[in-house]
Amino acid sequence: METLTTRVFDNGNSQAVRIPAEFRLETNRVSITRTESGDLVIHPLRAERGAALLDALRAVGEIDSEFIAALEAEQAAALPLQEREAL
């Protein structure tokens, strides 16, 4: 695993970490957790499925409220649990 040293700086009341190009994230949201040993773990979050499509369709103005409701209901529906062999 590659390790690089980078800078931490203040950004208002928050801190920010400069992420080198080698570790560039292809998302605008992440989750951050702190392990028991104090390490920070950053996980990129995928964009919400369909959100970009809904935004684009709203911008064009060619979408009706029933279509939006159907897409949002489909997106909110829980995925069924997968059956797997016991370990």
Image: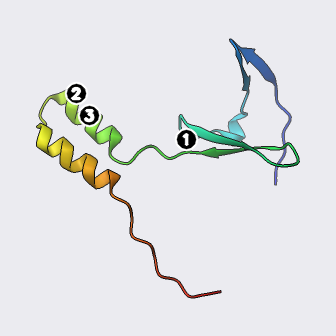
What x and y, as percent, mark residue 24? 64, 38
Q: Is residue 81 above or below residue 6?
A: below
Tell me residue 34's x, y (percent).
77, 43
Q: CA distance from mark 3 to mark 2?
A: 5 Å
Dot 3 amino acid type: Ala
How far is mark 3 from mark 1, CA to CA? 20 Å
Asked if the residue at tag 2 contacts the one at tag 3, i.e. Cβ–Cβ closer than 8 Å, the answer is yes
Q: In the figure, is residue 79 to the left or right of 61?
A: right
Place of residue 13 in the rendered image (x, y in percent of width and height, measured from the top left): 70, 14
Which residue position holds label 1? 26
* Colour convention: rainbow
Secondary structure state at the residue bearing disc 1:
loop
Looking at the image, which residue is at 84% across and 39% down?
4
Residue tagged 2 = 59
Nearer the N terminus, badge 2 or badge 1?
A: 1
* Residue 60 to residue 83: above or below: above
> What's the residue at 29%, 33% (across, down)?
55
**Type of amino acid under label 2:** Ala
34 with respect to 28 (left or right): right
Q: Position of residue 49 (x, y in %)?
A: 37, 48
Badge 1: few (under 14), some or many (20 or more) residues near its Cα, within 10 Å? few
Residue 68: quarter of image = top left
Q: Residue most toward the right?
A: 37
Q: Is 53 in front, or is 72?
A: 72
Under mark 1, the amino acid is Glu
Quadrant assignment, res 11: top right
Q: Look at mark 3 in the image and give the residue it sits on.
A: 56
